[in-house]
Image (spheres, rainbow, N blue to C red):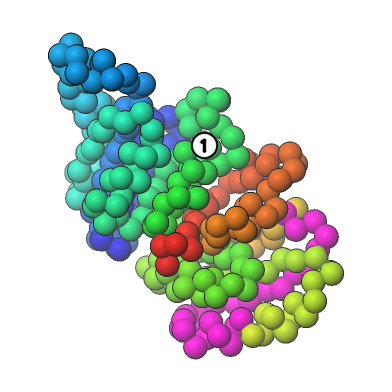
Amino acid sequence: MKTILYATDYSQNSASALQLAHLLCGAFHAKLIVMHVLDMPISLASTVSISHMKKTKKLLLEHGSKLKEFCSKHLGDACEELQISFEVVHNSSVVDAILEYVMKNSVELIVLGAKGGSPLKEFLLGSTAQALIKKAPTIVLSVPNMKTIGKFGTMIYATDFEQADIFAIGRLVKIATQFQARIKVVHITTSKEYAGDQQMEWFKEILGQKVQYKNMEFHLIFSDDILEELNGYLKKTNADLLAMLERKDSSFIQKYLQSDKVKKMASQLTIPLLSFNVSGL
């Protein structure tokens, strides 16, 4: 991993994401791009206005300084030790701005806060994080506001026994290796699923042919309340990270996160969520 993009709205919620991006950059000796998107609405008239151009240029310079101050505040002296570049871009869509930058600069990981600074933006994982999980061709790490950052002892991968899960776990192993982390691959399903134990054995065999990692274990859990069971499993295992595969129209999140109860649980997730998009594997 050579390039990591961290996007921020300067909120306290995004400070933990910055610290985690810093941790990952140190582990991989990667370059860190710190970005803020000026999402002011624009009109055709304003784009050709000289006064608008001057105002935009002034704002870009101001936010460049603000980004550096934000990093210094939350990283301290470590800010000077990293390969950091600061990017302030103007776009009416935060998501489009990030995606455009990712495509042009071969970014391998996007890190951002799970929720925005405004209550209006706090839905499920946060509107920006949710949109990037669906659209980004690379890995997305959404980070809740956390008290401590500093370890990746246990990583949980929630699988549906898809072929693409194998490639996603392979990429997760590369991250886990840097932290000597334990990976727990879990499949949680209702008791009505046919031959879940046989599917697990098949998946383990296929995965073992493609991915080698000694510190990996597998768990099959039957429950009629899948999301509640997952939440309990994360707490019981003292998980430091939850990883999933985003599939078009059939992701774990889209499949199960429909009820208000589930949306509330997801919004209260206290560990980072790492999302692999099937289109980027």
Residue at 24% from the left image edge and 52% from the top image edge: 105
Q: Where in the figure is residue 108, as x and y percent of width and height?
A: 33, 58
Q: Where in the figure is residue 139, as x and y percent of width and height?
A: 42, 57
Residue at disc 1, secondary structure: helix
Q: Which corner quadrant of the image does residue 11 belong to?
A: top left
Q: Where in the figure is residue 277, as x and y percent of width and height?
A: 47, 59
| Image: 192 above or below 8 | below
> As drawn, is 185 to the left or to the right of 18?
right
Is residue 168 visible in the rendered structure shown here? yes
Magenta stretch, residue numbers: 203-227
As for residue 204 lying within the magenta part, the answer is yes
Q: Where in the figure is residue 227, as x and y percent of width and height?
A: 72, 54
Residue at 42% from the left image edge and 43% from the top image edge: 112
Residue at 31% from the left image edge and 50% from the top image edge: 102
Q: Which corner quadrant of the image does residue 44 belong to?
A: top left
> As drawn, is 186 to the left or to the right of 127?
right
Residue at 44% from the left image edge and 62% from the top image edge: 279
- Which residue position is annotated with label 1? 127
| Image: 81 above or below 46 | below
**Amino acid under label 1?**
Ser
